[in-house]
Image (cartoon, grey):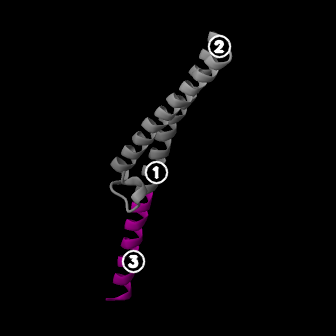
């Protein structure tokens, strides 16, 4: 190969690699934005609803403790659903990964 052909081949490889990195960066950015856009309002609304309920119901003692225990359980369910959503979104955007953490 001549120097011009080697340079052209290297330039093509560099361009292809740059395009792959740009696509992956865009996919990661979309992934992050969607995760925050879905998870943050859901968690804030759940916590707000639990707090609002506690202030409106005027519970005292054991009833208040049971109410907040139920609230913690609800938040755990919300986090479980959001975790599953984030995992499925990750699989759809990036496919199967090598990490066993994502292979639930």
- Mark 1: few, some, or many residues within 10 Å (few <14, many ≥20)? some
Horizontal and vertical percent position of residue 60: 68, 15
Q: Nearer the viewer, residue 95 or 11?
A: 95
Q: Which residue is painted at 40% across and 53% down in the image?
A: 102
- Compared with residue 58, is residue 8 higher up or lower down, i.e. above or below? below
Q: CA distance from mark 1 to mark 2?
A: 45 Å
Q: Is residue 64 left or right of residue 5?
A: right
Element carrying mark 3: helix
Q: Which residue is painted at 62% across and 10% down in the image?
A: 57
Mark 3 vs mark 2: in front: 2
Q: Is residue 36 left or right of residue 87?
A: right
Which residue is identified by label 3?
A: 10
Which residue is identified by label 1?
A: 28
Mark 1 vs mark 2: in front: 2
Can residue 66 be seen by looking at this rendering? yes
Which one is earlier in the sequence, the residue at label 1 or at label 3? 3
In the figure, residue 21 lies in which quadrant? bottom left
Which one is earlier in the sequence, the residue at label 1 or at label 2? 1
Tell me the tag on residue 59: 2
Q: State the extent of the magenta-drawn residues as a range.
A: 1-22
Task: Tally the numbered discs.
Answer: 3
Q: Which residue is painted at 40% across and 41% down in the image?
A: 84
Q: Kindly report the secondary structure that dominates the magenta region of the rendered protein.
A: helix
Horizontal and vertical percent position of residue 55: 66, 14
Can residue 48 be seen by looking at this rendering? no
Element carrying mark 1: helix
Horizontal and vertical percent position of residue 4: 37, 83
């Amino acid at each position: 190969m001549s120097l011009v052909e080697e340079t052209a081949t290297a330039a093509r490889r560099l361009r292809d690699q740059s395009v792959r990195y740009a696509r992956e960066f865009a996919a990661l950015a979309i992934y992050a934005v969607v995760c925050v856009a879905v998870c943050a309002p859901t968690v804030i609304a759940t916590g707000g609803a639990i707090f609002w309920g506690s202030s409106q119901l005027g519970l005292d003692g054991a009833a208040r403790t049971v109410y907040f225990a139920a609230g913690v359980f609800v938040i755990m369910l919300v986090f479980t659903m959001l975790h599953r959503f984030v995992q499925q979104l990750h699989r759809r955007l990036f496919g199967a990964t090598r990490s066993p953490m994502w292979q639930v």
